[in-house]
Image (cartoon, helix red, strand yellow):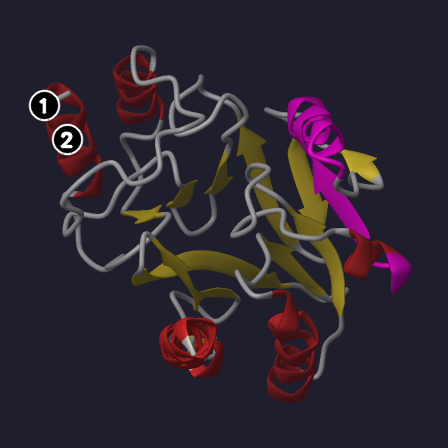
Amino acid sequence: MKKSIQLLMMSMFLSPLMNAQVKDFVIEPPISSNLHIYKSFGVFGGKEYSANAVYLTTKKGVVLFDVPWQKEQYQTLIDTIQKRHHLPVIAVFATHSHDDRAGDLSFYNNKGIKTYATARTNELLKKDGKTTSTEVIKTGKPYKIGGEEFIVDFLGEGHTVDNVVVWFPKYKVLDGGCLVKSRTATDLGFTGEANVKQWPQTMEKLKTKYSQATLIIPGHDEWKGGGHVERTVELLNKK
């Protein structure tokens, strides 16, 4: 009888968790005709968070910067992009090794879509038993694809040891990834793999090098407006 009660209580506890479904991704209104932000969602510490990611439409196809947080949404995003822009996804760039960024690159590798990550990110993926990218990012080098250009840059450690940012010079937009917190953030989020000591120095480099940016996109939460870098520095100063 006691065992039956325990099983019933466990069932009641697990049922909402099993039935809970993370929201589908949302494609935001375009920043420009070719540069787009999409949000995907995941749960951390019992709370749902949004993750901001970017994709770029080019004459040759679509370049995805970071993958949806949920693997089940990989194919749906590809299909949605194809339907919306009449273009295939031709490349995926990961800004660091976590699930809301690199995710499971084997999905894209198996489809013949080129995947890109830094050597450091690939080391971390391999260490965790995950699939590495087919191509290695050369940081600081301009990538020119289908009439569009971007630069993947490593400014230093912060949220992780491998976090990179992506600069779109034509649009003066910087995809800060999880290195940059939202102006609405109340804390630094997951810091289990962070270098909190070096993070402020990395942010100073970002502020100096990309002072001309008209938009800096944080990794999570509200991305519109400004103040994201300043809020990140403020949170770091509280540590």
> Which residue lies under the disc numbered 1?
238
Label 1 – label 2 distance at C-alpha: 5 Å
Amino acid carrying label 2: it is: Leu
Whether tag 1 and tag 2 are in contact, CB under 8 A, the answer is yes
- Element under label 2? helix
Q: Residue at x 62, y 25 (%)?
A: 139
**Residue 214: x percent and y percent?**
27, 47
> Which residue lies under the disc numbered 2?
235
**Residues in magenta?**
110-129
- Element under label 1? loop
Amino acid carrying label 1: it is: Lys
Q: Is residue 115 magenta?
A: yes
Q: Quadrant of the N terminus?
A: bottom left
**127 vs 140, nearest the viewer:** 127
**Residue 44: x percent and y percent?**
36, 53
**Residue 157: x percent and y percent?**
44, 18
Q: Quadrant of the C terminus?
A: top left
| Image-based side of 52 in relation to 237, left or right | right
